[in-house]
Image (tube, helix red, strand yellow):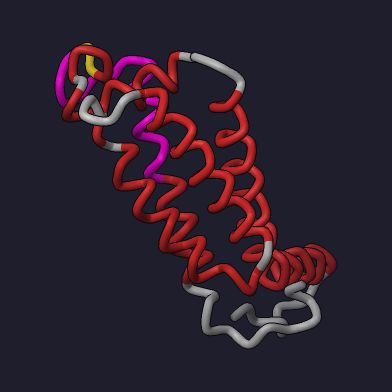
């Protein structure tokens, strides 16, 4: 925690800002993750894109006509679970399973995801690697599952 004994208007403002972030940060992170999953899931219903092509190519043993709507529904379910705290456990579990799958193209489609393995990903590879941030955010949000729900949280 921060030492409030340090005096001065700048320290006081800093303390208030940090205290606000501590109170609201986890909830805002959970909401933003939920929105991202809802959004990306919904986009998959709108038709083919480079992302859906890569997702389909990473799982060649399931027809894209089945896999892409299933993946879209899965992502929307994750988003709903993250936005509605009573379903947070389920949402985090679904998210971690889905996130593990998002890294498959790095191995299954190296010609699409790497210019030079392992240090220069393509644009598509960068899109996949950024999912490390989503995994970390999911771990932070998941770390709040056992916190007592307060009036601030919902």
Which residue is more in the foreground, 74 or 132? 74
x, y (%) of residue 39?
63, 36
Point out residue 54 in the picture as x, y percentages from the top left corner.
34, 21
Q: Is residue 108 visible?
A: yes
Residue located at (52% from left, 84% from top): 146
Q: Is residue 98 above or below residue 44?
A: below
Would residue 96 be found to the left or right of residue 30 on screen? left
The residue at 67%/55% (across/down) is 31
Question: Which residue is depicted at the point 49% across and 55% down?
Answer: 137
Quarter holding residue 58: top left
Q: Which residues are magenta?
A: 116-132
Residue 127 lies, with reference to residue 30, above or below; the image says above
The question of residue 126 being in magenta is answered with yes
Residue at 60 percent across and 51 percent down: it is 79
Hey, which residue is sitting farthest bottom in the picture? 148
Q: Is residue 91 left or right of residue 15?
A: left
Check the picture and name the quadrant holding the C terminus: bottom right
Taking depth in this image into account, of 117 and 97 the one nearest to the observer is 97
Q: Quadrant of the N terminus?
A: bottom right
Residue 118 placement: quadrant = top left
Tell how many labels.
0
Q: Is residue 105 visible?
A: no
The image quadrant of residue 106 is top left
User: Can residue 130 be found in the magenta stretch?
Assistant: yes
Q: What percent of the width, then of the height, locates residue 100?
A: 30, 47
């Amino acid at each position: 925690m921060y030492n409030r004994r340090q005096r001065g208007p700048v320290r006081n403002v800093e303390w208030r800002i940090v205290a606000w972030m501590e109170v609201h940060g986890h909830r805002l992170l959970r909401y933003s993750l939920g929105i991202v999953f809802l959004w990306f899931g919904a986009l998959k219903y709108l038709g083919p894109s480079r992302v859906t092509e890569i997702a389909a190519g990473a799982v060649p043993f399931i027809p894209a006509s089945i896999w892409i709507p299933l993946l879209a529904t899965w992502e929307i379910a994750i988003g709903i679970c993250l936005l509605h705290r009573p379903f947070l456990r389920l949402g985090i579990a679904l998210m971690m399973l889905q996130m593990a799958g998002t890294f498959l193209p790095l191995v299954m489609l190296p010609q699409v995801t790497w210019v030079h393995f392992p240090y220069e990903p393509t644009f598509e590879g960068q899109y996949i690697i950024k999912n490390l941030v989503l995994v970390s955010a999911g771990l932070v949000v998941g770390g709040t599952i056992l916190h007592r729900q307060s009036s601030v949280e919902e």
